[in-house]
Image (spheres, rainbow, N blue to C red):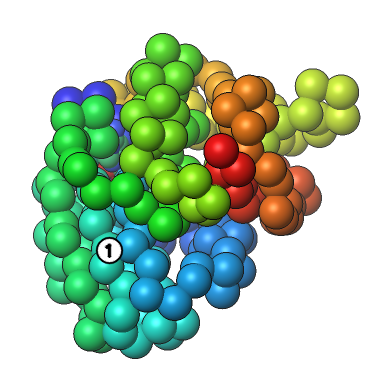
């Protein structure tokens, strides 16, 4: 299955910390304080599930979380996490195959869209947009390249990462899709934008204003 991290589930967090130290983690943790109490939260592509323990540090109870992860191994690792008294529903499916009547207060897509070819990215954006309430928050964390001031090392690192994941036959994307235009077209407002790892990692909090 495309974009499924089963093959490296047991090593993913170590690899991430080796290359990015704690930047990928910090980019996500800093956003969690913006989650309103008692929220219904959708997490897509949460990986090994460490984010559930970080969420439990912010709220030990009262969150209703739906956790959609395409990798069975990642899902199994996530299920073992200590998420305190929050309610977590684990769904081992690609988000493309996930259907729900719930509309969420908050959606998290950490390092999800950089796996996708443009067509899938657009489709998943539309799907998730439909699952988010008006006034809801969308936490987008991804790699970022700026056409004008992109440093050579960012391009090189990104290329190497895509090569590595292609060799393993995991990731379908060959290049980053800039999701910003889709958010702006759909009337999202940027509440916060933070950069990490020399600007190579971008963490944005979008608010859906209609
Ligand atoms: C780059 S990893 C990031 C993991 C985690 N968010 C983190 O930062 O540690 C991407 C994760 O998204 C999952 N994934 C990829 N495509 C997916 C899809 N279509 N639906 C749900 N999960 C997906 C992968 O299995 C993997 O666990």
| Identity of the residue furthest to the top in this view | 119
Q: Residues within 10 Å of mark 1 (few under 14, many from 20)?
A: many
Task: Say which residue appears at 16% left-offset and 61% top-offset.
Answer: 89
* Number of numbered labels in the structure image: 1
Is residue 39 rendered to the left or right of residue 144?
Answer: left
Quadrant of the image containing the N terminus: top left
Front-most of 79 and 35? Answer: 35
Q: In front: 173, or 166?
A: 173
Point out residue 197 in the picture as x, y percentages from the top left corner.
70, 53
Is 18 placed above or below 163 here? below
Query: Which residue is depicted at the point 25% across and 35% down?
Result: 95
Does dot 1 land on a helix, a strand or a loop? strand
The residue lying at 49 percent from left, 46 percent from top is: 134
Q: Residue at coordinates 31% horizontally, 80% vertically from top-left?
A: 62
Residue 146 visible in the shown view: yes
Residue 117 in percent (x, y) is at 43, 17
Give the quadrant of residue 50. Answer: bottom left
Where does residue 103 sit, x and y in percent of width and height? 32, 48
As displayed, is residue 65 above or below residue 74? below
Q: Is residue 153 left or right of residue 56?
A: right
Left or right of residue 53, residue 16 in this image: right
Which residue is identified by label 1?
Answer: 65
The quadrant of the picture showing ligand 1 is top left
Where, by quadrant of the figure, is residue 15 drawn? bottom left
Residue 61 in the image: x percent, y percent?
Answer: 30, 84
């Amino acid at each position: 299955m495309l974009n499924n991290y089963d093959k490296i589930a047991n090593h993913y967090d170590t690899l991430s910390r080796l290359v990015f130290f704690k930047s990928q983690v910090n980019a996500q943790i800093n956003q969690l304080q913006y989650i309103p109490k008692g929220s219904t939260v959708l997490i897509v592509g949460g990986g090994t599930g460490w984010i559930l323990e970080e969420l439990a540090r912010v709220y030990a109870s009262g969150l209703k979380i739906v956790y959609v992860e395409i990798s069975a191994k990642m899902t199994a690792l996530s299920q073992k996490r200590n998420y305190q008294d929050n309610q977590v529903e684990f769904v081992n499916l690609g988000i493309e195959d996930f259907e729900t009547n719930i509309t969420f207060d908050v959606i998290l897509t950490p390092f999800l869209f950089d796996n996708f070819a443009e067509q899938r990215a657009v489709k998943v954006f539309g799907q998730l947009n439909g699952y988010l309430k008006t006034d809801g928050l969308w936490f987008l964390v991804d790699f970022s390249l700026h056409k004008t001031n992109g440093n050579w090392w960012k391009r090189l690192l990104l290329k190497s990462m895509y090569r590595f994941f292609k060799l393993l036959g995991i990731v379908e994307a060959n290049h980053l899709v800039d999701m910003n235009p889709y958010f702006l077209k759909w009337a999202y407002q940027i509440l916060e934008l933070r950069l990490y790892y020399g600007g190579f990692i971008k963490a944005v909090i979008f608010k859906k204003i209609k």
